[in-house]
Image (cartoon, rainbow, N blue to C red):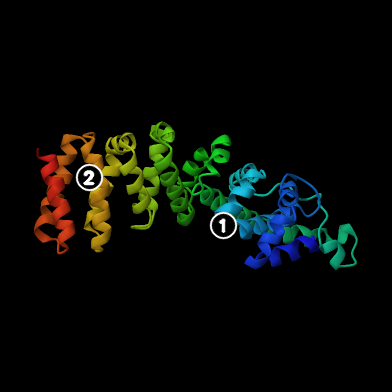
Amino acid sequence: MKMLKNIRALSGDVLTLEGIQKSGAIQTFIKFLERRSGKFLVEICTTVLMIMYNFCKISKKRQEYAAASGLVPHLIYFSSSKRDGPPQLGNLSHPFSSCFMLSPSNYSFLFHFYSSLFFPLLWRLMGSAAMEMLCDFAHSEKCRPYLKKHHVLHHYLNFLVLSKSYISVNALEAIAVWLGEDKEMEAEIAKKVEVDKIVHMFKVAPDGSMLAPLLKILSTSDQISAKLGENTTFVTLLVERLSHRDAFVKLNLLKILKPILVQKTISPELIKSKVLPTMKHLEEDEGMVLVKNMAKQIRELVTQ
């Protein structure tokens, strides 16, 4: 355990990472992640994941090396287990037994108190780190075959409904990048249950944070654009958000609305009651010329 902690500290220095790779230690670290029970399970897995996080975070080549070495299924396990909490730890040995000269019956209360406080925190830390690494891997072309092999797209889509918005945005960016280079994913993402996850994220995500990756997805996929147009909740919320104070947010919202309108799946009633009045208002009252022009283009598009 001490050795792992020392390596974790060393991995924070970018100059050590090439040496760690050349030593063949990555395969050994990944074997540690195969453990599902035993002494100091959570501490060992957390430490190894932090080493892998430092190893992968600034280099696509090291991400590819880690993926080829078998890291992906372990990232899936820890990112999925994040919502379930750590395994049962009551029978595990623990540092309290060596820090205090106490019998097991005497330190039992201290151990369970410590476990209840800190093990769930460590488990959440592992889950967040695993999710972030999984999302980063989508940006590397050589990592994607390993992601496809283990059906990681399904996990990205599940990340969209998590309460942590930065993970959701990272997942949407991963989907956008991957979809841009692999249209085979389009049919899976366009399923109603998956489109509903995008709609949920749009409801809860901070204004502007998800607009760029969503726009990239809609620019790539007519099928997903059409499905979002069929979702009255999404279209209504999209139009309502055009009252935002930030002109650049409004411009991105209009850019998202345009490819959806092109698919002609928004109901005529919604266009008449929501879209057209809002476009006319922006044409007349908006100060930013780019927003006015985009609103005019959309109004002309729906009145053709």
**Residue 200: x %, y % from top left:** 39, 45
Is the residue marked by circle 2 packed among few (<14), some (14-19), or many (20+) residues within 10 Å?
A: many
In the picture, measured across the screen, residue 68 lies left or right of residue 43, that is left
Up-down relation of residue 243 to residue 158 (above or below): below
In the picture, measured across the screen, residue 114 lies left or right of residue 135, that is right
Residue nearest the viewer, comparing 31 with 81: 31
**Residue 178: x %, y % from top left:** 45, 43
Residue nearest the viewer, comparing 100 with 172: 172
Residue nearest the viewer, comparing 270 with 72: 72
Quadrant hosting residue 10:
bottom right
As helix, strand or loop, the secondary structure at mark 1 comes to: loop
For badge 1, the amino acid type reads: Ser
- State the residue position of label 2: 258
Is the residue marked by circle 1 packed among few (<14), some (14-19), or many (20+) residues within 10 Å?
A: few
As helix, strand or loop, the secondary structure at mark 2 comes to: helix
Up-down relation of residue 83 to residue 114 (above or below): above
Dividing the image into 4 quarters, which one contains the N terminus?
A: bottom right
Q: Which callout, 2 or 1, points to the residue nearer the camera?
A: 1
